[in-house]
Amino acid sequence: MIETEQYQAKTLYPFQEKTVSSILNEFEINDENFNLLFQLPTGGGKTVIFSEIAKSYIQKYGKNVLILTHRIELSVQTSKQLKAIGVDNKVISSDVKKLNKDEDYPCYIAMVETLNNRLQEDENFIKNVGLVIVDEAHYNSFRKIFQYYSSTNILGVTATPLSSNKALPLNDNYNKLLVGECISSLIEDGYLSDAETFTYDVNLHGLKIGSNGDFTVSSSEIVYGNYFMQEKLLFAYEEVAIGNKTLIFNSGIETSLSVEETFKKRGYQIKHLDSTFSDKDRKFILDWFKHTPGAILTSVGILTTGFDEPTVETIILNRATRSLTLYHQMIGRGSRKLPNKSVFKLIDLGNNVRRFGYWQDYINWQDAFRFPDRFLEARLSEGDDIEFEIEFEHSKYLKEKLNVQKLDSFDIKSIYFDCIQKDQKGKIAIDLSLENHYEVIMEASGDFYDSLDFIKALQEHIEYRLKQYTKCITKSTPNYYKFILETYVRQLRQKLRDNLDDE
């Protein structure tokens, strides 16, 4: 049973009231299959807004509302807000195996994995649903639920309308994007604190890109775990934020533990927190952080969503990321406004500001929603991969199935420039690259169908290699890259079909 009696309902600001009306109007003028995505920056009050929408929807249409989250803390937070504004609701936790016949709630809140398990056993687990609200809608895991609610309205809410899986864009599931107030407007109107940004150039040589498109934890641990980076972090803190309540984001646990040790040796009040901590220990540390002036909390992958501590005065990005969503989530933890807090400090130790721009900068989210691939290519620095000589890290599957050493030994940039020096066409590098992929796949394939699976698994590596090639060409365009990628994959598939069919 979730205790909500002491929870004070959050009243809507004028811009939030306007947003509620706009969203409800979209559902009124469209049919029951209409899916809407709503964007609002972190700190803009998404939970307050969609809770009010749930209340109004229930009252107007007499149908149930289902709210999906990906963490129990978000479920509890939403349940409390709903209860406080008079909406009776039930959280579908892992303990709830079935709903009794006498249980009839107008609103249900569930974590996606828990609900998916219940729906697989009973498609009618929750009945009479007219609206599904998806919190943090950019996470791809929610898609598995949509099949059960194909004839209902879906409202997705997110600060960054970019799918966590670039191969599954959000415009596949949502008919329209409604963009809320931008960060600069929320700052100007006094709803968010402004960020004073301090950047420190760091050498990111050695970082590797994983299959998810971001820098791998293992390579980040090596870069950020060394003595010099620890000293740079300490120097930045003492130069900019000494005495401030500070939240440090790291990529790996070992790095965060080293940060804790480094700061403790200098006498600072600091604690480490990661996802392996028990609920009890996590609650204790967050309570300590809340009530300790000048406290420092160094964390890993746990406080980017569902964490609201307005007293944070400084955010330190002690990591690099290629995810715009994560970039905004981390910075947003410091943007909560207090009467005596109109500005917070941001220290960037991952060249992230250079990669994405300032947090307050205007972003064309409609462009991101309609053309996500083009949008991401434009946001990331053109020289990013070359500047830091980032290596590609293969998935565990590829390491087990293919000769990845042979793939890694092929340097398309070096081969391209060798061809140019010999007065040969640079495109020979593409032909040799295709032969390299072909040989590696042939060695591991029993038949043509095996080879198709390997081509699919190698898609990101092929894209990575061809991007390295196009960056060597001064007049390369996005359309040219798309052309050579499609041609490359088609020729590779045909070459494998011809030779495997002959055996």
Image (cartoon, rainbow, N blue to C red):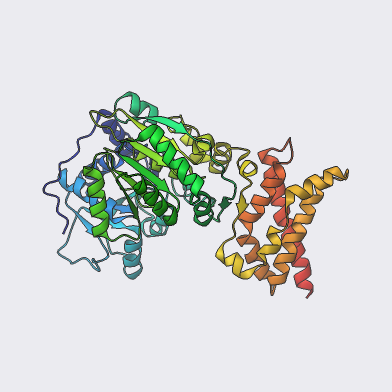
- Asked if residue 395 is positioned above or below residue 261 in the image, the reply reads below
Foreground residue among 402 and 315: 315
Foreground residue among 272 and 476: 272
Query: Splitting the image into 4 quarters, where does residue 43 fall?
Result: top left
Report whether 256 appears left or right of 114: right
Foreground residue among 81 and 150: 81
Q: Residue at x 82, y 47 (%)?
A: 418
Quadrant of the drawing holding the N terminus: bottom left
Q: Residue furthest top?
A: 188
- Asked if residue 211 is positioned above or below residue 162 in the image, the reply reads below
Q: Residue 315 appears at what percent x and percent y?
A: 37, 39
Report whether 24 appears left or right of 382: left
Query: Splitting the image into 4 quarters, where does residue 197 fall?
Result: top left
Q: Residue 359 appears at what percent x and percent y?
A: 43, 33
Q: Residue 53 appears at what percent x and percent y?
A: 26, 42
Q: Is residue 78 among the parts visible in the rendering?
A: no
Q: Residue at x 57, y 42 (%)?
A: 203
Q: Residue furthest left?
A: 5
Q: Residue at x 36, y 44 (%)?
A: 266
- Asked if residue 440 is positioned above or below residue 39 in the image, the reply reads below
Foreground residue among 440 and 131: 440
Report whether 482 appears left or right of 173: right
Q: Residue 466 appears at what percent x and percent y?
A: 69, 49
